[in-house]
Image (cartoon, rainbow, N blue to C red):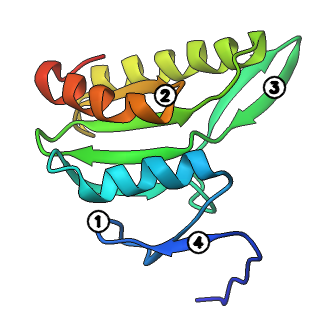
């Protein structure tokens, strides 16, 4: 175990195995608060220093993508949530590769059911969670 210091804002979490969440933005802070209070969320973690990454190809270069949150919902679905203020061609390419990863892991079947979504506004996260709980797919 190592000590990890940060100058960024952080807050204690209730539903994460990591006791504090370090925020990159106030938007992430708002969404984290919703994840902690939402009854449809069993557990969540900010994907920071966890090693969960998706490789993707953009303009001929292999890159790595680290989605913002990994969430376990009450229906058993694992939801990967990306927080995005602006959208770009590179972001759309990342999501294409994320979609391929989701299809592959779900097809394998050994790791449960996975889904992904993008939140383009802090107000969207509750609806995204509700939709994932109802449909098991986004």
Residue that mark 1 sits on: 15
Q: Is residue 69 above or below residue 49?
A: above
Pair 1/4: label in front: 4
Give the residue at x 68% y 13%.
93
Task: Residue 18 in the image: state x and y as whole percent.
Answer: 44, 73
Q: Which residue is the extreme one toward the right? A: 60
Q: Are the residues tagged 2 and 3 within 8 Å (C-beta)? A: no
Q: Secondary structure at mark 3?
A: strand
Give the residue at x 56% y 60%.
50
Pair 3/4: label in front: 4
Residue that mark 2 sits on: 119
Q: Earlier in the sequence, mark 1 or mark 4?
A: 4
Dot 2 alpha-carbon crowd within 10 angstroms: few under 14, some 14 to 19, many 20 or more: some
Task: Residue 39 in the image: state x and y as whole percent.
Answer: 14, 50
Distance of mark 4 from mark 2, alpha carbons?
20 Å
Distance of mark 3 from mark 4, alpha carbons?
32 Å
Residue that mark 4 sits on: 10
Q: Are the residues tagged 1 and 4 within 8 Å (C-beta)? A: no
User: Looking at the rendered structure, which numbered label has been put on residue 131?
Assistant: none
Q: Secondary structure at mark 2?
A: strand
């Amino acid at each position: 175990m190592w000590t990890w210091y940060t100058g960024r804002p952080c807050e204690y979490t209730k539903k994460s195995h990591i006791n504090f969440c370090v925020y990159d933005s106030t938007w992430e802070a708002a969404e984290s608060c919703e994840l902690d209070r939402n009854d449809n969320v069993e557990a969540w973690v900010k994907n920071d220093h966890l090693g969960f990454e998706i490789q993707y190809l953009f303009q001929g270069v292999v890159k790595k993508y680290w989605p913002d949150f990994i969430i376990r919902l009450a229906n058993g679905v694992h939801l990967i949530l990306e927080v995005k203020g602006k959208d770009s061609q590179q972001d759309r390419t990342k999501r294409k590769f994320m979609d391929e990863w989701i299809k592959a892991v779900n097809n394998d079947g050994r790791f449960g059911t996975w889904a992904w979504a993008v939140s383009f506004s802090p107000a969207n996260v509750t609806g995204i969670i509700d939709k994932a709980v109802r449909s098991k797919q986004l």
